[in-house]
Image: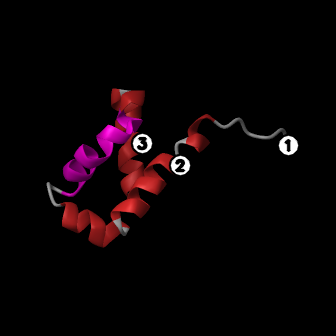
Amino acid sequence: MFLDFVLSHYVSVGVEELDQDKLTPLLRLKYHNSIADAVADLGRPDEIGRVFTGFQKYLYQQQAAA
């Protein structure tokens, strides 16, 4: 899954991998330079961008006390 790929880069490289400017390079890396394959797998570019930025808030969200 693409988000797992992004998270592995986040862990190994650092928080800068979550920058919006990194989305296209990460897609190219994951999908072997084929944005068309990324779109076919993940959906429209605007949806990909929304998911890329949307999931990040959960990385730092504190878990509610059980």
Which quadrant would the C terminus be assigned to in this image?
Answer: top right
Do the numbered discs 3 and 1 sit on residues whose CB atoms are within 8 Å? no
Residue farthest toward the front in the current orientation of the protein: 46
Residue farthest toward the left in the current orientation of the protein: 33
Residue at 66% in and 37% down? 61
Tell me residue 6's x, y (percent).
Answer: 37, 45
Which quadrant would the N terminus be assigned to in this image?
Answer: bottom left
Label 3 or label 1, whichever comes before in sequence order: 3
Tell me residue 32's x, y (percent).
Answer: 15, 55
Q: Which residue is mark 3?
A: 7
Tell me residue 46's x, y (percent).
Answer: 39, 61
Tag 3: amino acid: Leu
Tag 1: amino acid: Ala
Tag 2: amino acid: Phe
Badge 1: residue crowd in 10 Å (few <14, some 14–19, many ≥20): few
Left of 35 or right of it: where is 66? Answer: right
The quadrant in which residue 22 appears is: top left
Residue at 61% in and 34% down? 60
Q: Which residue is mark 2?
A: 55
Label 2 or label 3, whichever comes before in sequence order: 3
Tell me residue 34's x, y (percent).
Answer: 16, 60
Secondary element under disc 2, as helix, strand or loop, is: loop
Q: Which residue is mark 1?
A: 66
CA–CA distance in space, label 1 to label 2 = 22 Å
CA–CA distance in space, label 2 to label 3 = 10 Å
Residue at 28% in and 72% down? 40
Asked whether residue 18 is drawn in magenta, I would say yes
Secondary element under disc 3, as helix, strand or loop, is: helix
Secondary element under disc 1, as helix, strand or loop, is: loop
Do the numbered discs 2 and 3 sit on residues whose CB atoms are within 8 Å? no
Q: Nearer the viewer, mark 2 or mark 3?
A: 2
User: Which residues make up the magenta segment?
Assistant: 17-31
